[in-house]
Image (cartoon, grey):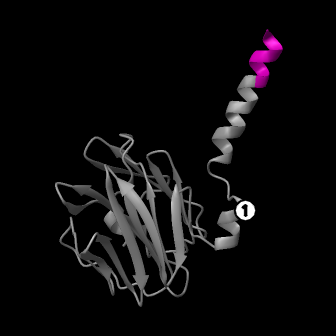
């Protein structure tokens, strides 16, 4: 019985650890957001997904991310401007690669839509987490770091983590009830200080 319990524990630990490891498809796609349920990478491409019987088709083309539901097409990101803005500060214009994908951050079995942009130098990343509610897209989180040397976001359950490669500091955003709570392993007091 003890041996079975230890085996089960080791399998569970391995499963938890593997959720944050790069898979073969992550490596092949060169994604910089590890752990999304489904995604595309690059400056152009398409992705389809469903939310509560609504089917969406995402298109990424020339620095613009748009989502279509039937014949209705909405631009969600264009040239550094996030349309469903939740905050009043200006986000930097990042013109590098995109990762768009879906993941359930709110733990309600309904996926959220993620738009992540990495700048051309590869030292800054911003991700927008959008929720489809009452027929429109709203931003429930804007996370990222453009100061320092960051090259990827890791997603695990309700948490997004970014590591500063220069200092080793970890920045975490965890979804709780109505938004993302920020924590830093260094003395960074606010997520706004990273932008």
Instruction: Give the residue pinned by disc 1.
Output: 24
Instruction: Locate residue 46, reporting x and y percent.
Output: 47, 75
Whether the magenta-drawn stretch holds residue 44 is answered as no
Instruction: Locate residue 179, reporting x and y percent.
Output: 28, 49
Q: Residue furthest front?
A: 70
Identified at 35% across, 65% down, the residue is: 56
Quarter occupied by residue 166: bottom right
Identified at 73% across, 32% down, the residue is: 11
Give the total of numbered labels.
1
Residue 30 is left or right of residue 96, and the answer is right
- Which residue is more in the foreground, 89 or 175? 175
Residue 49 is left or right of residue 76, and the answer is right
Q: What is the magenta segment's predominant secondary structure?
A: helix
- Which residue is more in the foreground, 168 or 140? 140
Residue 176 is left or right of residue 34, and the answer is left
Instruction: Locate residue 128, reporting x and y percent.
Output: 35, 66
Note whether 17 is above or below 184 in the view shown.
Answer: above
Instruction: Locate residue 139, reporting x and y percent.
Output: 26, 62
Give the position of the C terminus as an image quadrant: bottom left
- Which residue is more in the foreground, 52 or 31? 52
Tell me the SS state at disc 1.
helix
Identified at 40% across, 87% down, the residue is: 63
Structural crowding at the residue carrying mark 1, measured as other residues with C-alpha within 10 Å and reported as few (<14), some (14–19) or many (≥20): few
Give the position of the N terminus as an image quadrant: top right
Residue 190 appears in view? no
Residue 37 is left or right of residue 90, and the answer is right
Q: Residue furthest bottom?
A: 62
Q: Residue furthest right?
A: 3
- Which residue is more in the foreground, 20 or 144? 20
Identified at 67% across, 39% down, the residue is: 15
Residue extent of the magenta highlight: 1-7
Residue 179 appears in view? yes
């Amino acid at each position: 019985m003890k041996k079975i319990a230890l085996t089960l524990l080791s399998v569970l630990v391995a499963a938890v650890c593997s959720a944050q490891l790069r898979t073969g498809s992550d490596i092949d796609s060169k994604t910089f957001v590890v752990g999304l349920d489904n995604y595309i990478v690059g400056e152009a491409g398409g992705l389809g997904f469903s939310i509560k019987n609504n089917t969406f088709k995402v298109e990424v083309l020339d620095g613009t991310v748009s989502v279509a539901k039937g014949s209705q097409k909405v631009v969600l990101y264009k040239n550094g401007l996030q349309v469903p803005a939740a905050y009043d500060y200006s986000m930097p214009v990042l013109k590098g690669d995109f990762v768009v994908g879906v993941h359930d951050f709110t733990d309600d079995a309904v996926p959220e839509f993620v738009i992540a942009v990495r700048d051309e130098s590869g030292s800054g990343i911003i991700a927008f987490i959008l929720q489809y509610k009452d027929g429109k897209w709203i931003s429930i989180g804007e996370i990222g770091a453009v100061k320092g040397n960051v090259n990827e976001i890791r997603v695990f359950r309700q948490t997004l983590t970014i590591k500063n490669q220069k200092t080793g500091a970890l920045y975490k955003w965890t979804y709780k009830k109505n938004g993302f709570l920020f924590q830093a392993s260094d003395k960074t007091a606010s997520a706004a200080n990273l932008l």
